[in-house]
Amino acid sequence: MVVTQVGTITDAPEVPVAKLLADPEAYRGKRVRVTGNVAAMCHHRRAWFAITGKGDKSGRHLRVLTAPAFLVPPRSVGKSARAEGTVEIIAVDPAMARHLADSHKLHYPQRERPIKRVVLRASGAEFS
């Protein structure tokens, strides 16, 4: 199996994606590692990817923001990934939410106001 490592991975504690999404405030500002499957990615700028927990078919995902630390390797959708970084809660404006839903098939409710979402600001990742 070929493993592609980008950025820096250390020994951050592993947190299941579902657990992080269920209680993001408990992890805000903390450095963690997540493991799962790449469900989507930014093909244009390669600045983020979405990860789901292994075997999770719920459609819930965690967006992993990679730029400027590193770019997501091409053809990463469908691969397994391990990412490490700092948990943030950001506002996603309605135009970006529509783009993520329409162009990347990620579940974002259509609203007129920004919505809060948990993201991982990554320092490194491995894809296999």
Image: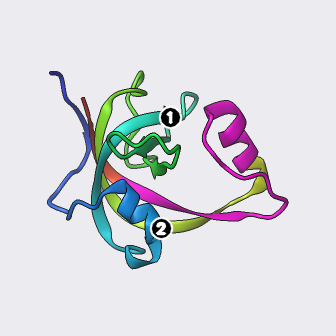
What is the CA distance from the residue labelled 1 to the residue labelled 2?
19 Å
Mark 2: secondary structure: strand
Mark 1: secondary structure: strand
Where residue 14 sits in the image (x, y, percent)?
22, 60
* Label 1 environment density (alpha carbons within 10 Å; few <14, some 14–19, many ≥20): many
Q: From what the image shows, is residue 3 above or below residue 114?
A: above
Where residue 52 sits in the image (x, y, percent)?
41, 44
Is residue 80 toward the left or the right of residue 66 in the image?
left
* Label 2 environment density (alpha carbons within 10 Å; few <14, some 14–19, many ≥20): some
Q: Which residue is drawn at 46% across and 35% down?
A: 39
Circles 1 and 2 in contact, beta carbons < 8 Å: no
Q: Which residue is drawn at 39% across and 26% down?
A: 78
Where residue 75 sits in the image (x, y, percent)?
41, 21
Q: From what the image shows, is residue 21 above or below residue 23?
A: above
Which mark sits nearer the N-terminus, 1 or 2? 1
| Amino acid type at image mark 2 | Glu
Is residue 35 toward the left or the right of residue 101 in the image?
left
| Amino acid type at image mark 1 | Met
> Which quadrant holds residue 128?
top left
Where residue 120 sits in the image (x, y, percent)?
42, 58
Q: Residue at x 66, y 41 (%)?
A: 100
> Which quadrant holds residue 57?
top left
The residue carrying mark 2 is: 88
User: In the drawing, what numbered circle is on residue 10?
Assistant: none
Residue 26 included in the magenta stretch of the image: no
User: In the drawing, what numbered circle is on residue 41?
Assistant: 1
| Magenta stretch, residue numbers | 97-122
Total tally of numbered discs in the picture: 2
